[in-house]
Image (spheres, rainbow, N blue to C red):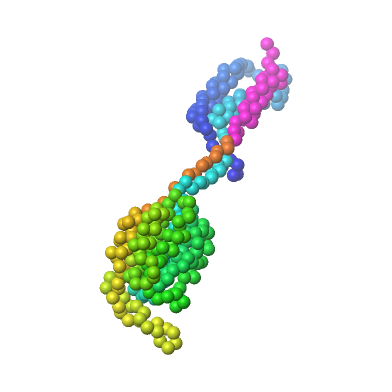
Amino acid sequence: MDYWQNIFFESPNWFWLFLLIPLLIGWYIWKWHQQSAEVRISSLEGFKMSQGWLPKLRPILPVLKLLALSTLIIAMARPRTVDVTSQTQNTKGVDIMMAIDVSASMLAQDLEPNRLEALKSVAGDFIEKRSTDRIGLVVYSGESYAKMPLTSDRALTIEALKDINFSETLKGGTAIGMGLATAVNRLKDSKAKSKVIILLTDGVNNAGFIDPNTAVDLAQQEDIKVYTIGLGTNGMALSPYAKTQNGKFRYRRMKVKIDEDLLKTIAEKTGGRYFRATDMEKLKTIYDEINKLEKTEIKEFKYYNYQEKFRPLLFLALGLWLLEIILSFTVFRTSA
């Protein structure tokens, strides 16, 4: 069944010839009646009646002709099968480093369940969609380090992303300059056609020994585009400010402070864009937009292997035609 489903006809216009078949059938019927003479006599007594089987089979000759013609028409329509194989080739790869703020303020609950967990969920979907690119992770607070080097293994990167949590082992504060510089350092040796950093923070640069402007200069030198995201609601947000004796955070409503001027400057100088994510839906929209802006060009090559199926039909039509001729001059030959 699958065999016949894969067959298509290269020249289906030949099927119009099937309209001749009813005309030929009508012509054969008319001719048969013309060849049958009618004699009226009063009695059949004295005639020896012979009911041989050969005269009854004579109509098989026009049937063979019609079958031969039908088979020939199908052959002329060129039935064939095709086996298609595809091969894709990246013509413009994108290397992406995601620099993620993991300071204590990322535990604020203006996004559910908090900013950091909301980010991990959305960023995970973003990574899943970038099936042909290499992605790495940098985390920073008062200092920074590479959590995951550039890799095309999406599953590995997503696992590393899930493993990101607030940690008191890192120095407190928000070192935007160091986070950006670490990401630049991981991209500077990249041979990709496009190099991108997605830098996310929910605060202001208040720590680290690398000035953000210095990090921007480094990104410009390496032709790296930086998209910046300010994460946090407008106004007040329920944020951690201290810890209890058992190590749990205390929360209170605090004013959200994001250095939007700095984030805009970083984006503008490197050819990127600045986004503000005030809620979960806005954050999803931002990552979707970045996904559209940074496209990987892919060329797809398709190889077609055609197999012609008309030859057996031609031989069958020829065989039917020869059989009709042989029967006409032998078994069904009429004496002159």
In the image, taking residue 236 as reference, residue 76 lies left or right, namely right
Q: Is residue 311 magenta?
A: yes
Residue 13 placement (x, y as % from top left): 49, 29
Q: Residue at x 66, y 26 (%)?
A: 319
Task: Give the residue drawn at x 28%, y 76%.
Answer: 255
What residue span does the magenta drawing correspond to?
Answer: 307-336
- Residue at image coords 63%, 18%: 42
Residue 239 appears in view: yes
Residue 80, image x, y percentages: 57, 35
Residue 27 falls in which quadrant of the image?
A: top right
The residue positioned farthest toward the top in the image shown: 336
Residue 60 is at least partly visible in this image: no
**Residue positioned 53% across, 34% down in the render:** 9
* Magenta residue check for 317: yes
Q: Quadrant of the N terminus?
A: top right
Which residue, as the protein is rendered here, is positioned at the far bottom? Answer: 245
Residue 100: give x, y in percent of width and height.
41, 67
Q: Nearer the viewer, residue 136 or 72?
A: 136
Q: Quadrant of the C terminus?
A: top right
